[in-house]
Image (tube, rainbow, N blue to C red):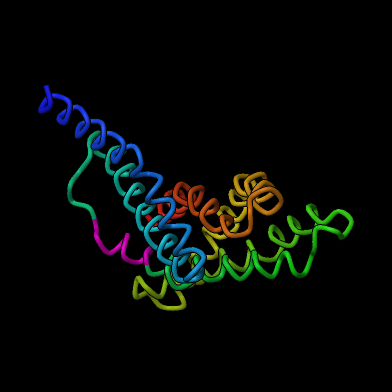
């Protein structure tokens, strides 16, 4: 009887460990977020940005050939990872940090003011930075950057306003400060997929 009981206990222990894995990952993430906020958000942004480009390549491959081609360009996800790590993560961290400082919750219509600052100042500047960095990472010159801005920037900005305005209203006003970059990154996974589709 004893071996059977001990086997059942071992199985139950393994199940409990498996169930607690997401909890352990979340606990570790929260610890890293507290100890190294900028680095943690930068790494998260880099990974999710790269994955967004990877998804974009798969979607375009399926649309073009009717199936998933394994001939994906590894340079695309690498460029997006670099942008996410060095720009998207850190800039978003400090923007959200200072946004609460510039427009405290006690200020009348603080939610609307924060949203307007994000939508009318941060979003256009950040999108332009994205176009510029991608142009640089692709090894293209300023003429190519200028042409890309003329053909794609306004379309992308309009799409940004449509998609991100409700998202950012929720993010800025209802998501705790330490989770805003992560929340934005989850939505940006699909946003970067869209932006990457403008590249071809």
Viewer-closest of 128 and 108: 108
Residue depicted at 24% across the width and 58% down the height? 73
Q: Residue 86 appears at what percent x and percent y?
A: 44, 73
Q: Which residues are magenta?
A: 73-81
Residue depicted at 34% across the width and 37% down the height? 19
Q: Is residue 179 left or right of residue 72?
A: right
Q: Residue furthest right?
A: 108
Q: Quadrant of the N terminus?
A: top left
Q: Is residue 184 left or right of residue 13?
A: right
Residue 52 higher or lower than 91, as above or below: above
Residue 59 higher or lower than 100, as above or below: above
- Figure quadrant of residue 118: bottom right
Q: Quadrant of the C terminus?
A: bottom left
Q: Residue 83 appears at what percent x and percent y?
A: 43, 68
Residue depicted at 37% across the width and 73% down the height? 137
Q: Residue furthest front?
A: 2
Viewer-closest of 149 and 12: 12
């Amino acid at each position: 009887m004893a071996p059977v009981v001990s086997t059942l206990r071992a199985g139950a222990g393994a199940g409990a460990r498996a169930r607690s894995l997401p909890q352990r990952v979340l606990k570790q993430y929260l610890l890293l977020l507290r100890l190294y906020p900028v680095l943690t958000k930068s790494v998260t942004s880099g990974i999710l940005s790269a994955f967004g480009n990877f998804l974009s390549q798969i979607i375009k491959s399926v649309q073009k050939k009717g199936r998933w081609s394994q001939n994906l360009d590894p340079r695309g996800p690498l460029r997006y990872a670099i942008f996410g790590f060095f720009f998207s993560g850190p800039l978003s961290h400090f923007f959200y940090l200072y946004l609460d400082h510039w427009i405290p919750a006690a200020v009348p219509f603080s939610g609307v003011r924060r949203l307007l600052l994000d939508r009318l100042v941060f979003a256009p500047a950040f999108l332009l930075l994205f176009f510029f960095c991608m142009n640089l990472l692709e090894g293209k010159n300023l003429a190519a950057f200028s042409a890309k801005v003329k053909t794609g920037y306004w379309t992308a900005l309009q799409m940004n306003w449509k998609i991100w305005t409700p998202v950012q209203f929720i993010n800025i006003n209802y998501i705790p400060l330490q989770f805003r970059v992560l929340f934005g990154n989850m939505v940006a996974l699909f946003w970067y997929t869209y932006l990457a589709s403008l590249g071809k």
